[in-house]
Amino acid sequence: MQLHLMREHLMQRNSMQAHGRMRLVTEDELVAGWRDLLAEYHSTWCALDRALRDGHDLGASEFEVLDQLVEAPKKEAGLRMQELGASTHLSQSALSRVIARLDAEGLVTRAMCDTDRRGVCVQLTAAGRERHAQAIGTHRGVLAKTMVGRKSVQPV
């Protein structure tokens, strides 16, 4: 049933694109594009995870959480778990495990949110800010090495 719906959607999109003078996309091209995207994502994620673990004792997900907390507005008292989950694309259980590891290492703290006592806010500690500062060069270097020149990232 899903394949039938996908084909129907493709035919509708191709019909609409034909009137707008855009080139039609075949099912094979769509699947090939999806697989290319997955390969690019996974190879980049694995390279990030390996480099961050080897150089800074951080996993890629742990770095992403620290990165989001560093970029949070200064006026905020950390970020709510729901906000972190949405911005890092981690499930609630995966995010809870990541936060527990970071908390155990003293890189973040967890507390009830000041504005809504039902929510849990995560705050970056000084040690977390320092570990992020040490790891960011590795992170950005891996991104530059693995992504620049690919379809998704072109030099300006």
Image: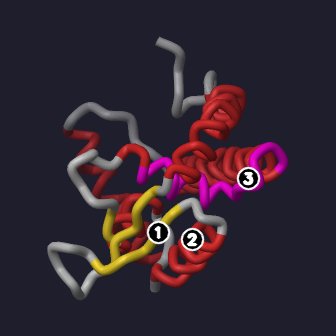
Q: Look at label 1 and name its amino acid.
A: Thr
Q: Nearer the viewer, residue 75 or 62?
A: 75
- Tell me if residue 138 comes above or below residue 97 in the rendering: above
Region of the chain picked out in magenta, as a range = 54-69
Q: Secondary structure at mark 1?
A: strand
Can residue 124 be seen in this snapshot?
yes
Q: Is residue 94 left or right of residue 92?
A: right
Q: Secondary structure at mark 3?
A: helix
Residue annotated with mark 1: 109
Q: Position of residue 101 (x, y in %)?
A: 64, 72
- Tell me if residue 75 comes above or below residue 113 in the rendering: above
Q: Position of residue 49 (x, y in %)?
A: 73, 52
Residue annotated with mark 3: 49
Can residue 28 be seen in this snapshot?
no
Q: Which mark is residue 147?
A: none
Q: Which mark is residue 103?
A: 2
Q: Residue furthest top?
A: 156
Q: Look at label 2 and name its amino acid.
A: Asp
- Tell me if residue 82 comes above or below residue 107 in the rendering: below
